[in-house]
Image (cartoon, grey):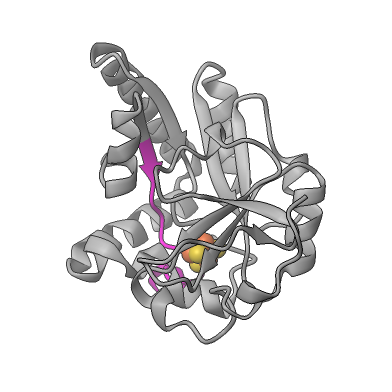
Amino acid sequence: MNHLLSVSSDAKTIKGQKKGYLTGILYLAPADESVSSGGFNTCPKASAGCKASCLFTAGRSAIFPMINQARIRKTVELKNDREGFLRQLASDISALVRKAERDNLIPCVRINGTSDLPFLAHAMAELFPNVQFYDYTKLPHPWTRVRKNYSLTFSHAENNLTDCLAALDHGINVAVVFGTKKNEPLPKTWHGYPVVSGDESDLRFLDKRGKVIGLYAKGNAKQDATGFVERNGLFTFAAAK
Ligand code: SF4
């Protein structure tokens, strides 16, 4: 089995490196993208809007088809040989930890870069209790799945406002993609919760609690018409809590 983790492979994780963190991310094929190739649905709560705007279709993967082919291959490997996949993932994380030590950086790992599989993250977080893990998720009740070394940020979509507000109520931050133009500031609040920028880095486990993590729309998300990208509420938000 080939290597599974991508290390500091995008602009946001490179920003994290400047803050002292070496980030490894596992990118599988999201939602049902791998099903016709023998894989499985990796995002049980994906919405039409998030699927159309997913990272799977953004950045370098939009230019080089082999990137997404590799993600599909990894997803099929996970389905067909779960034990082998977990062994390889653990080996990749060990290598990341060693590299971080050599480079005087702190290792951190996002298991669900383009998937939503808590069992994988929990298995690795248990195996590496001294490594910080983090993910975004659309599965409801995220507060039941956080661990000492596993942080979760809930992701807003066009169909999960109730789950977003429940997450915020339970101290889990919520990431919201806003339709704000790049040269304009993000809204100050969303449903009464203060918005902070999530584009400075991907180090979500460092965010203070009780925040909405505001992201600018990128790639296909700029054309979103499903409500996945928050546009309607921009001028009607309540005062900050
Ligand atoms: S849940 Fe996340 S990873 Fe899955 S399709 Fe939606 S945006 Fe992509």
In this rendering, would 7 be left or right of 241?
left
Say which quarter of the image contains residue 234: bottom right
Most foreground residue, 8 or 194: 194
Say which quarter of the image contains residue 223: bottom left
Residue 170 position within the rendered picture, expressed as x and y whole percent measured from the top left: 81, 44
* Relative vertical location of residue 43 with respect to residue 173 in this rendering, above or below: below
In magenta stretch: residue 54: no
The total number of labels drawn is 0
Residue appearing at x 68%, y 30% in the figure: 147
Q: Quadrant of the N terminus?
A: top left
Most foreground residue, 82 or 148: 148
* Relative vertical location of residue 91 with respect to residue 223 in this rendering, above or below: above
Residue appearing at x 57%, y 63% in the figure: 187
Most foreground residue, 117 or 210: 210
Residue 227 position within the rendered picture, expressed as x and y whole percent measured from the top left: 59, 80
In this rendering, would 25 be left or right of 137?
left
Residue 103 position within the rendered picture, expressed as x and y whole percent measured from the top left: 24, 16
In this rendering, would 43 be left or right of 87?
right
Work out whether residue 116 can be spotted. Answer: no
* Relative vertical location of residue 27 with respect to residue 147 in this rendering, above or below: below
Work out whether residue 111 can be spotted. Answer: yes
- Magenta stretch mostly in which secondary structure? loop
In this rendering, would 108 be left or right of 154?
left
Residue appearing at x 44%, y 73% in the figure: 53
Magenta segment, which residues? 24-41
Residue appearing at x 52%, y 68% in the figure: 178
In magenta stretch: residue 29: yes
